[in-house]
Image (spheres, rainbow, N blue to C red):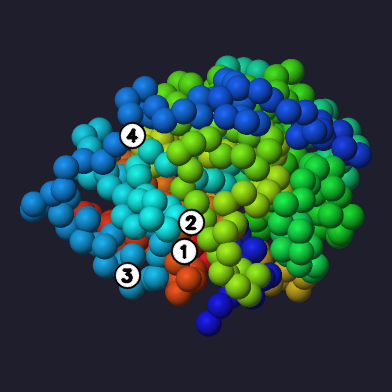
Amino acid sequence: MRPSRRSALLRLATVTAVSALVALGVPATSAGGATGAGAGATATTGGGAGSEHGRPCVGTPTPTGGPALDVLKVAERAKDELGLKSVIVKVTADGRELLTTALGESMTGVPARPDMHFRNGNIAISYLGTALLRLVDEGVVGLDEPVARWLPDLPRGDRTTLRMLGASTSGLVDYVTTPGFGETVYADPFRQWTPEELVDISTRQDPWYQPGESWSYSHANFVLLGAALERITGTRLDHLLQQKVLGPLGLHGTANSFTPDIPTPVLHAFTADRGRYEESTFWNPSWTTAPGAVQTTDICDLASSAVGVGSGELLSPAAYRELLNPGTVGLGGATGKCPDTVCIPQTEATHYGMGVLVLDDWISQHPLFFGYSASQDYLPCEHLAIAVSTTDGPDAAGGHSAHTIAQRIAAVLAPEHPIPDFG
């Protein structure tokens, strides 16, 4: 059965967890256009076919045995079982490439390739968290400083800290789950949303709880965090993420865009979210997160990102501990006002960190929207990275197919360390 428009939209990024589970001083950077590689792409963020520290993102030879063949078989079976149009996978262990492959088609008659670019959704939120923690390491800012210092008109901004935005404990209602928002997006999927519009939807509603008292995912947190980071540093967000995260990690195939454009080569997406199977590649993702962090990537960068973010490569030991648990463990749970499908209990085993998901021994993120699904997962104890990107075929089963495939790969390569669901 096809998902409803609303339920399909709710699965964006960590909203998968939530559904299973500027007037405010926000700079309108989305109104400006940046020039550079690819129309609308930011000049400082690559966007070409290069990836993985400048090397081309290409497939490995077809394996004839061993773990690489096991992973390939998982991907092939899942593609057929889940009705997917394409599956692109990269797995590395101890920094060595185990398998890079692309199955299926981008469009009819156009084979999927590892170097094709796709939308990375909330993967960029892990970059926001890492960038914030790098600024903390540098002594530029403190996690517990109130955001009113930079966003003075934000309601409860004097009691809402940078930590609360990054860890999603502000209490702000998620504009994506607001009644009518999904219908509005699907009625005009090419609409350019401004950060002011998005934040206003959240802030004009009563919060789920007072700042810091519980946990609930809200896209508004990250729109506001992006705005605050710009104010703190005096640097446009796309440039800041390039300086603090993308550049140091060598993510040359990852690009911001202030338009719906995607640098070539493009992995095309299709969805039945509006009741008919149609192309959704260039539907406008401006509602998904802060302008300057609306990105595309390729599978090689996704694997490198899993390692770089998940290992805390750019962070001090103290900041890495904050990445994995900025105080979220023990929060959440149903109250008279907030159901446990929204205020999801945060446990030691499965909880939200600073822009990342901690799923037992794995550090993950897995976006899902507009026909694109992806998953980046890192297992520090075995230095194992899994990156998966999928697109739906006309008979797709629905659900988070890339994360499902990542879970199945983990079960083959690290059976003692399964990737659990969140929520």
Amino acid found under the numbered disc labelled 3: Asp
User: Relative to the observer, which residue lies in front, 125 or 61?
Assistant: 61
- Disc number lying in front (2 or 1): 1
Residue placed under numbered mark 2 in the picture: 373
Q: Residues within 10 Å of mark 1 (few under 14, many from 20)?
A: many
Can residue 146 be seen from the camera position used here?
Answer: no
- Disc number lying in front (3 or 2): 3
Residue placed under numbered mark 1 in the picture: 392
Amino acid found under the numbered disc labelled 1: Asp
Residue at the extreme left of the image, as rendered: 65
Q: Can you give x and y, in whole percent of width and height, for residue 196 in the image?
A: 84, 43
Q: Are marks 2 and 1 in contact (CB under 8 Å)?
A: yes
Residue drawn at x 66%, y 48% is 285
Q: Secondary structure at mark 1?
A: strand
Total marks shown come to 4
Q: Can you give x and y, in whole percent of width and height, for residue 179 in the image?
A: 79, 68
Q: Secondary structure at mark 2?
A: strand
- Quarter holding residue 44: top right
Residue placed under numbered mark 4 in the picture: 57
Q: Secondary structure at mark 4?
A: loop
Asked if 183 appears above or below 243 in the picture, the reply is below
In the displayed structure image, the side of residue 189 where residue 381 appears, left or right = left
Numbered circle sitting on residue 80: 3
Earlier in the chain: of badge 2 and badge 1, it is 2
Amino acid found under the numbered disc labelled 2: Ser
Earlier in the chain: of badge 3 and badge 2, it is 3
Amino acid found under the numbered disc labelled 4: Cys
Earlier in the chain: of badge 4 and badge 1, it is 4
